[in-house]
Amino acid sequence: MSLPLDGLTAIVTGAGRGLGRAEALELGRLGAAVVVNDFGQPGRDGSGEASATPAEQVAAEIRAAGGRALAHTGDVADHEQARELVESAVAEFGKLDILVNNAGILRDRMVFSMTEDEWDSVIRVHLKGHFNTTHFASAHWRARSKATGAPVYGRIVNTSSEAFLAGSAGQPNYAAAKGGIVGLTTSTALALAKYGVTANVICPRARTRMTEDVFAGFGRPDEGLDPLAPEHVAPLVGYLASPAAADVNGQLLVVHGGMVAVVERPRVAAQFDSKQDTFSHDELDALLTPYYADRPRGETFAAAEVLGLKRDRGGAAH
């Protein structure tokens, strides 16, 4: 019996632990050959000596289950190492069909205390890391499409966070990077659609090394699967990577604990038109001040309200 991803090759970044590991195992279970990428640093802030062990262990799990897998330990935030990652997938398995971007680090601090390095390092790994792999994967798909004169099979699944939707007071670098990933995804979706490639982005809630502080107050159940287990997220990634999701493109989805929510793009909540050639300060004061006075202080995007999000000291969902 054929599996949904039989004959396809996937790259999963940050796949040595947590969400990436669960996603890599799921893609392997669905039949894909998987390149398991993880730089292997032990600290969630990107500290510590890099190790091949996390990536190799996950690749070994996939192979032990009867699948095909290759471990890769490059830093996706490095442009040339991202190129080598894509090239290694093509060299080992003949082509690349699926890219799942998941790698990231945390360096949390309030905006007034954050250092330049804390800002740059998080933007580098999350946002630049997503761009680097997307750049080389999309070039691979475009070249294949031009060579055949027809669309190819390509799937990109990027990882954002509800921190970009609802805000996260102690994570301005992380929230900005995750918002940038959404913009990167929607732009990529438009650019690559004619080549047969889709790009979508997920906001997962999961208990991982990255979110151990955020979900510290949420106990694990005595029986059954933890509602915050990464295994709840992996099936959606498998679906978005599959032929079944051919018509899903440029979408943002929140996923956790057996729930998937499709998030609409921001909509206009209210509109005010000047009765003159242009607004004066007094006219804006008369229109906008009462409008905001009637709204809850600190109210954020409607999407956050729909999903029932609450601000807390951690704020991140991934």
Image: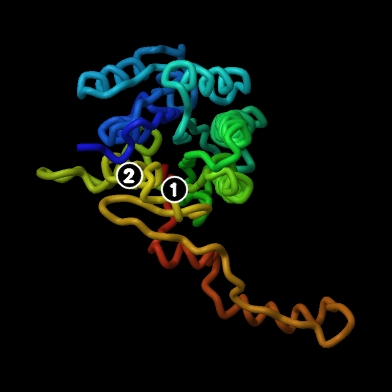
- The label shown at residue 116 is none
**Does residue 244 appear to the left or right of 177 in the view shown?**
left
Circle 1 Cα neighbour tier, 10 Å, few/some/many (<14 / 14–19 / ≥20): many
| Quarter-of-image position of residue 289 | bottom right
Q: Nearer the N terminus, badge 2 or badge 1?
A: 1
Which residue, given by chain and number where applicable, does mark 1 sit on?
Answer: 202
Q: Dots 2 and 1: beta carbons under 8 Å?
A: yes
Q: Is label 2 in a helix, a strand or a loop?
A: loop
Q: Position of residue 5 (x, y in %)?
A: 33, 37
Disc 2 from disc 1: Cα separation: 9 Å
Q: Position of residue 156 (x, y in %)?
A: 49, 40
Q: Position of residue 175 (x, y in %)?
A: 55, 45
Question: Which of the two residues, 149 or 125, is positioned nearer the viewer here?
Answer: 149
Q: Amino acid at mark 1?
A: Ile
Q: Is label 1 in a helix, a strand or a loop?
A: strand
Which residue, given by chain and number where applicable, does mark 2 sit on?
Answer: 233
Q: Is residue 123 visible?
A: no
Residue sitting farthest toward the front: 148
Question: Which of the two residues, 173 or 109, is positioned nearer the viewer here?
Answer: 173
Q: Does 293 sit above or below residue 221? A: below
Residue sitting farthest toward the bottom: 275
At 32% from the left and 50% from the top, the residue drawn is: 256
Please identify the quadrant where the C terminus is shown. top left
Q: Amino acid at mark 2?
A: Val
**Does residue 240 appear to the left or right of 278 in the view shown?**
left
Residue sitting farthest toward the left: 223
Question: Which of the two residues, 246 or 104, is positioned nearer the viewer here?
Answer: 246
At 48% from the left and 47% from the top, the residue drawn is: 201
